[in-house]
Image (cartoon, grey):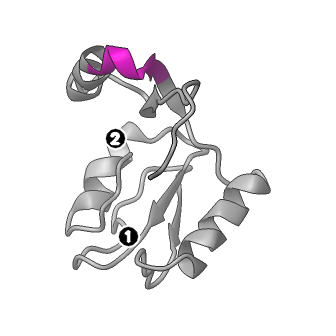
Amino acid sequence: YDNYGAPGTADAAMPSLRSGGTYIFLPGRGGSVSSNPKDGVAQINFGLCNSSGHDDLDGISTMVAEGMLKPVISQTFALENIVEALNASFSGHTVGKVSVIISQETEVTLV
């Protein structure tokens, strides 16, 4: 569930989460964890997270690397299929995230 920390986000996320899932809350926009969590769904308040630096986000990266968080990618698209990727995302029926692969097969010279 895409969590941006606004009030009510946690409660709105609960129907989309499966038992055994985890809701991670990154506060900053006035929201909080759900007061009525779904049975079997863990909630983690990651505390104040400053996304302008790397320190806080490195903690989340470590959790992913250690298998504590498992991101779900529903579909992957090549950049030339960006319209299909956007349509899939906007449909509201994806489970997880939609990924767009940007190929760097062409050598780029910086001037």
User: Image point 44% across, 18% down: which residue?
Assistant: 78
Label 2: how many Cα within 10 Å (few below 14, some 14–19, many 20+): few
- Residue 59 at x, y percent in the picture: 64, 72
Kindly give the residue lying farthest to the right in the view shown: 66
Type of amino acid at the residue the image marks with label 2: Pro
Label 1: state its secondary structure. loop
User: Image point 33% across, 69% down: which residue?
Assistant: 35
* Picture layout, residue 108 above or below residue 11: above
- Residue 32 at x, y percent in the picture: 32, 74
Q: Which mark is residue 33?
A: 1
Q: Quadrant of the N terminus?
A: top left
- Front residue of 38 and 16: 16
* Picture layout, residue 19 above or below residue 4: above
Type of amino acid at the residue the image marks with label 1: Val
Label 2: state its secondary structure. helix
Query: Image quarter for residue 71?
Result: top right
**Which of the marked residues, 2 or 1, is nearer the chain's N terminus?**
2
Q: Which mark is residue 15?
A: 2
User: Image point 56% across, 49% down: which residue?
Assistant: 40
Is-magenta flag for residue 61? no
Left or right of 10? Residue 41 is right
- Residue 94 at x, y percent in the picture: 36, 24
- Front residue of 48 and 34: 48
Q: Which mark is residue 88?
A: none
* Picture layout, residue 16 above or below residue 3: above
What is the C-alpha distance between the residues marked 2 and 1? 14 Å
- Residue 70 at x, y percent in the picture: 64, 44
Q: Which residues are magenta?
A: 75-82
Left or right of 2? Residue 73 is right
